[in-house]
Image: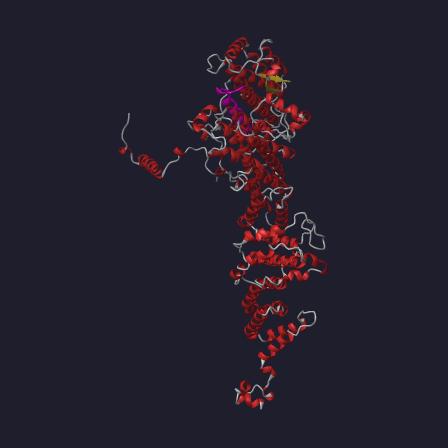
C-alpha cells in the first residue's frame, strides 16, 4: 500500500496520515526533526538539555540542509512561546541548540544567520533573566567566530549599545559578574571581527568606556589565568573568541569569568586594529577623550598609563609601530580639551615619559616628530616664563613643572632614537622658521640649545668621526647673522654644544641634567636664557646646582679631542667668515664677543685633526690679525667700548692660535701690547684658553657697558695699545717657514695671505634670510609697541599651526612657510598674475630680435 500511495495516490500520504502503512520514515523529515526537538525538550533533573540529542539534530541538519529554514522557524516560534509564558528554563534550550548548530554545521552558517541574529536580539532584551542574556552573549560569540565576510556588519553593529549597557551594570553578585564577563567577551569578539574586516564602529566611544570601567589597573593575574604580555611573545594564547576559548585549559575558567580579563582581550583586539597612522588615531581618540573627561591621566592614580603601556607592548610584539602611540600621546598635549589645564598636560607628559622608557630603540620618523613636538612645547614654556613677568604664582608653578616634565620626556625620547643624526635634522628644520621677533627667536634658539645639550650628552660617546650636517650648519650660519644679538649668541652656543660637547665653555655652568626642583618661574627663566646668559648668571645657578666638579672632569684635552664632531675644510672657512661678518655689528655685547671667541676656539680644535691643518691655521691667524687691525682703526664708526671688546677678542684669538701652533712668544707679545694697568672691564682671558665675560664681583667695577664713562675709558685703552703688529706677523711667518723648510711648496702663499686683509669666502651665504629682509625692528621695546602682546596670548608665530612637520630624516624640502611672514608680503591672485605677465614681457623682450629693442644711451 505504501508503494501505491507514492506512485498512484501521492495525496494519501498527506490525507491518510493516521494510516500506519503510509508512514515512510525516510520520506517524512518534518516529523523526524520535530520528534528530535521534542526529545531535546525532555529535560533531565538538572535542567540542562542533552548534548547527545542536540548532536543528533545537528547530524540531521547537515544531511538535510534544505530543511534548515523550517527548522529555524520552528525553533524561533518555540522560543518565543516559552518566553511569553516565562518558562526561562525551557527557553534556554533554543540558544543551546543554535550554539551547537553553529559549531558543528559551519558550512551552513549563512542559512542560520538571520534566525540566529533574531534570537540573539531577543535574548539580550530579557532583562529579567541573567542566564538568557549570558546565553545571548555566548551565542553571539559563536556566531562571530564563524563569519568569513562582512555581510551582517550593519546588524551586528546595532547590538553594540545593548552589549555595552549590559557590561556597564555594576553588580557584585556572581551572576552579575558572569553577565558582565559574557558581554565583554561578546564585545571582544565584535572588535576582533570588525578589525578583520577593516571596519571601526561608530559606537567605539561607548565600547572604550565599558572597557576602561572594567579594566583594573592594579590587578595582577596569575600566569594560569592570562598570559603575561611582558613575558610571552605568543599573543595568540589569549582567548578572544569562542573558538579560542575552547583551547583554554580547565584551570583558566576563572579568567574567562573575570571582566578584567575580557577587558584586556578587548584592548588587545583594539591594538591589533591599529596598524597605521589613521587607524591608530581612530583607536586612540576615544581613549584620550575618556581619559580627559574622567581625570584618568594621573600616572599615580589613573588607568591611562597601564592601558597605554599594555597597548604599546601589544603593538610592538605584533610587529606594528608602537612609536605611533607615543607620538599621538605627545600630540594630545595640544588638544583643546586639555590646552587650558596645565595639571593634565603635566600628567600627559609624565605618561609619555613612561611610554618612552618602554619604547623600542629605533630611529624612526615618528620619534623625530615627537621630539619636535616636545621642543615646540619647551619653546612655549620658555616664552611664557619670559613674557609673563606679572603672572600669578600658580601659573608660574605649573609652567615650571611642565617644563621639568617636558625635559624629562625629551631625554627619554632622545635615548630611543639611537643616533644623533635625526635629532640634528629636526633642529635644522626648526631653525628654518626662525622668527624675526626677538623674544620668539630667543626662546626658539634656547629650546634648540637645550635639545642640543641633551642630544650631545646622550650620544657624545659616538661623536668620533661623525660629520656635522650641512643643512643644520647652513641654518646656524644664517642665525649667526640674526638682527637680535642674543639670538646670535644662542646660535654660537648651539654650534659649540654639538661640535664639542665635552669642551668646558664659558656658559657651561648649566650642565646635564639640570636639577630643577624649584616651583617658580625664576628657575625656568634662568634656563630659558641659558643660551644667552654669560658667566655672571651661570655662576649664580652653579652655586645652587653643585655640578662644577663634574664639568671640570670633562676639561681634559684628550677627552675633548676624542669627542669632536668633524667639520670639513669648507665648513671651517665659512665659520671664520661668519665671525668676520659678525665682529663689526654695532649691537654686539660682551657676550657676543665671548661666544665668537669660543666658536673660534672650537674651529681651532677641529682643524688640528686634519692632515692639512696648516691651511685652516693660517686662515685663523689671518682672521685674528684682521680683527685686531679693525679694532684699532680710528676711522671705524663702531663705538670705542665695542672696539675694545673686539681688540680683546682678537688678542685672545691670537693666543689660542699660538697655543695650537706652538708659538709661545706670540702670547708674550700680545700681552705686552697693552699696559698692565689697562684692562678690559667686560672681557677677560682665563688660563690663556678661555675668553669669558667678566662678572661685576670679580672686576670690582660697576661700569655699565656702553655708558659715557665706559666709552671714554675705552678710548684711552685703545690709544695706549701698541698698534704695530709687524713683530707678531714675523713670528708667525718664521714659524711656518721653519715648519715647511723641507716642503717649500706648502709655504708658498702663506706669507702673502698673512699680510693680506681677511676676506669673506665666496661660498659664504650672503643672501639674507627672511628675518633679515623684514623692515620690523627687533628691539624688545619696539616689538612690544608693534605687537602689543597680551600676557595670556601666544603670538601667531607660537601658535599650534606652526608645528614642525618632520617627514623624513634629512629631508627639508617640504616644509611650511615661516609663520613670521607678514600677510602683506603674500601676493594675492591678481598680483601674482600681474607679476607673471611682467616677467613674461621681459622674457619676450629679451628674446626678440635686436632691431626691435629700443636704443638707450
In which quarter of the view is residue 364 placed?
A: top right
Q: Nearer the viewer, residue 250 or 43?
A: 43
- Quadrant (top left, top right, bottom left, bottom right) of the N terminus: bottom right
- Quadrant (top left, top right, bottom left, bottom right) of the C terminus: top left
**In this rendering, is residue 174 above or below 437?**
below
Observer able to see residue 622: no
Residue 68, x across and y down, in percent: 56, 73
Observer able to see residue 87: yes
588 is within the stretch colored magenta: yes
> What span is in magenta?
571-589
From this viewpoint, which residue is outermost toward the front? 85
Residue 712, x across and y down, in percent: 51, 10
Residue 333, x across and y down, in percent: 55, 40
Q: Nearer the viewer, residue 33 or 730?
A: 33
**In this rendering, is residue 460 above or below 356?**
above
Residue 697, x across and y down, in percent: 61, 16
428 is within the stretch colored magenta: no
Characterize the magenta stretch by its predominant secondary structure.
helix
Q: Nearer the viewer, residue 349 or 518?
A: 518
Q: Nearer the viewer, residue 745 or 391?
A: 391
Color theme of the render: secondary structure
Number of marks? 0
**In-image side of 841 versus 802 (left or right):** left
Amino acid at each position: 500500500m505504501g508503494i501505491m500511495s507514492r506512485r498512484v495516490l501521492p495525496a494519501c500520504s498527506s490525507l491518510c496520515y493516521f494510516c500506519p502503512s503510509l508512514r515512510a520514515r525516510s520520506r517524512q523529515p518534518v516529523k523526524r526533526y520535530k520528534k528530535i526537538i521534542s526529545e531535546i525538550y525532555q529535560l533531565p533533573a538538572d535542567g540542562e538539555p542533552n548534548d547527545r540529542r542536540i548532536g543528533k539534530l545537528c547530524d540531521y541538519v547537515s544531511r538535510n540542509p534544505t530543511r534548515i529554514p523550517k527548522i529555524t522557524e520552528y525553533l524561533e516560534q518555540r522560543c518565543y512561546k516559552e518566553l511569553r509564558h516565562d518558562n526561562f528554563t525551557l527557553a534556554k534550550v533554543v540558544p543551546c541548540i543554535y550554539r551547537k548548530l553553529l559549531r558543528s554545521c559551519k558550512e551552513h552558517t549563512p542559512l542560520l544567520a538571520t534566525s540566529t541574529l533574531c534570537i540573539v536580539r531577543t535574548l539580550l532584551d530579557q532583562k529579567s533573566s541573567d542566564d538568557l542574556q549570558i546565553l545571548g552573549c555566548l551565542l553571539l560569540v559563536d556566531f562571530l567566530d564563524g563569519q568569513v565576510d562582512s555581510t551582517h556588519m550593519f546588524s551586528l553593529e546595532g547590538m553594540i549599545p545593548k552589549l555595552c549597557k549590559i557590561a556597564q551594570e555594576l553588580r557584585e553578585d556572581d551572576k552579575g559578574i558572569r553577565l558582565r564577563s559574557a558581554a565583554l567577551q561578546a564585545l571582544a569578539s565584535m572588535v576582533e571581527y570588525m578589525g578583520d574586516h577593516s571596519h571601526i564602529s561608530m559606537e567605539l566611544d561607548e565600547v572604550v568606556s565599558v572597557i576602561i570601567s572594567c579594566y583594573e589597573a592594579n590587578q595582577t593575574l596569575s600566569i594560569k589565568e592570562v598570559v603575561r604580555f611582558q613575558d610571552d611573545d605568543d599573543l595568540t594564547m589569549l582567548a578572544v573568541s569562542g573558538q579560542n576559548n575552547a583551547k583554554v585549559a580547565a584551570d583558566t575558567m576563572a579568567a574567562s569569568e573575570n571582566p578584567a580579563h575580557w577587558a584586556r582581550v578587548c584592548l588587545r583586539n583594539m591594538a591589533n586594529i591599529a596598524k597605521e597612522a589613521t587607524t591608530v588615531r581612530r583607536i586612540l581618540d576615544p581613549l584620550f577623550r575618556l581619559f580627559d573627561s574622567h581625570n584618568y591621566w594621573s600616572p599615580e592614580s589613573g588607568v591611562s598609563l597601564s592601558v597605554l603601556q599594555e597597548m604599546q607592548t601589544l603593538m610592538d610584539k605584533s610587529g606594528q609601530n608602537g612609536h605611533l602611540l607615543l607620538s599621538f600621546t605627545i600630540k594630545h598635549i595640544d588638544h583643546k580639551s586639555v590646552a587650558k589645564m596645565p595639571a593634565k598636560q603635566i600628567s600627559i607628559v609624565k605618561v609619555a615619559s613612561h611610554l618612552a622608557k618602554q619604547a623600542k630603540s629605533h630611529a624612526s620618523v615618528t620619534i623625530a616628530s615627537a621630539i619636535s613636538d616636545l621642543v615646540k612645547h619647551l619653546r612655549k614654556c620658555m616664552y611664557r616664563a619670559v613674557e609673563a613677568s606679572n603672572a600669578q604664582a600658580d601659573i608660574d608653578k605649573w609652567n615650571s613643572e611642565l617644563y621639568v616634565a617636558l625635559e624629562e620626556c625629551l631625554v627619554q625620547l632622545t635615548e630611543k632614537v639611537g643616533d644623533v643624526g635625526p635629532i640634528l635634522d629636526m633642529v635644522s628644520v626648526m631653525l628654518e622658521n626662525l622668527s624675526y621677533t626677538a623674544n620668539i627667536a630667543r626662546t626658539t634658539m634656547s629650546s634648540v640649545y637645550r635639545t642640543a645639550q641633551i642630544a650631545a650628552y646622550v650620544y657624545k660617546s659616538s661623536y668620533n668621526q661623525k660629520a656635522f650636517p650641512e643643512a643644520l650648519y647652513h641654518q646656524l650660519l644664517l642665525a649667526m647673522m640674526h638682527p637680535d644679538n642674543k639670538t646670535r649668541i644662542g646660535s654660537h652656543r648651539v654650534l659649540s654644544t654639538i661640535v664639542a660637547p665635552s669642551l668646558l665653555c664659558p656658559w657651561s655652568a648649566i650642565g646635564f641634567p639640570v636639577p630643577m626642583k624649584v616651583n617658580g618661574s625664576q628657575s625656568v627663566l634662568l634656563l630659558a636664557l641659558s643660551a644667552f646668559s654669560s658667566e655672571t648668571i651661570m655662576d649664580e645657578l652653579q652655586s645652587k646646582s653643585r655640578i662644577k666638579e663634574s664639568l671640570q672632569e670633562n676639561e681634559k684635552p684628550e677627552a675633548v679631542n676624542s669627542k669632536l664632531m668633524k667639520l670639513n675644510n669648507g665648513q671651517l672657512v665659512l665659520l671664520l667668515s661668519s665671525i668676520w661678518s659678525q665682529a663689526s655689528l654695532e649691537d654686539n655685547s660682551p657676550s657676543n664677543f665671548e661666544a665668537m671667541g669660543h666658536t673660534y676656539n672650537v674651529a681651532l680644535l677641529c682643524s688640528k685633526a686634519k692632515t692639512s691643518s696648516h691651511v685652516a691655521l693660517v686662515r685663523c691667524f689671518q682672521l685674528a690679525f684682521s680683527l685686531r687691525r679693525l679694532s684699532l682703526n680710528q676711522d671705524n664708526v663702531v663705538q670705542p667700548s665695542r672696539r675694545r671688546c673686539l681688540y680683546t677678542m682678537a688678542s685672545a684669538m691670537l693666543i689660542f692660535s699660538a697655543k695650537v701652533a706652538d708659538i709661545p712668544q706670540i702670547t708674550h707679545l700680545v700681552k705686552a701690547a697693552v699696559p698692565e694697568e689697562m684692562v678690559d672691564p667686560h672681557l677677560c682671558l682665563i688660563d690663556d684658553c678661555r675668553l669669558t665675560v667678566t662678572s661685576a664681583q670679580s672686576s670690582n667695577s660697576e661700569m655699565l657697558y656702553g655708558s659715557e664713562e665706559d666709552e671714554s675709558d675705552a678710548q684711552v685703552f685703545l690709544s695706549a695699545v701698541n698698534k704695530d703688529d709687524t713683530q707678531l706677523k714675523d713670528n708667525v711667518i718664521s714659524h711656518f717657514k721653519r715648519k715647511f723648510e723641507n716642503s717649500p711648496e706648502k709655504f708658498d702663499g702663506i706669507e702673502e695671505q698673512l699680510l693680506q686683509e681677511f676676506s669673506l669666502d665666496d661660498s659664504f651665504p650672503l643672501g639674507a634670510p627672511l628675518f633679515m629682509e623684514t623692515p620690523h625692528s627687533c628691539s624688545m621695546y619696539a616689538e612690544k609697541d608693534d605687537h602689543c602682546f597680551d600676557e595670556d596670548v601666544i603670538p601667531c608665530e607660537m601658535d599650534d599651526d606652526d608645528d614642525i612637520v618632520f617627514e623624513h630624516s634629512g629631508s627639508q624640502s617640504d616644509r611650511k612657510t615661516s609663520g613670521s611672514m607678514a600677510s602683506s608680503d603674500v601676493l594675492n591672485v591678481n598680483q601674482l598674475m600681474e607679476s607673471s605677465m611682467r616677467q613674461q614681457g621681459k622674457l619676450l623682450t629679451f628674446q626678440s630680435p635686436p632691431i626691435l629693442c629700443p636704443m638707450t644711451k
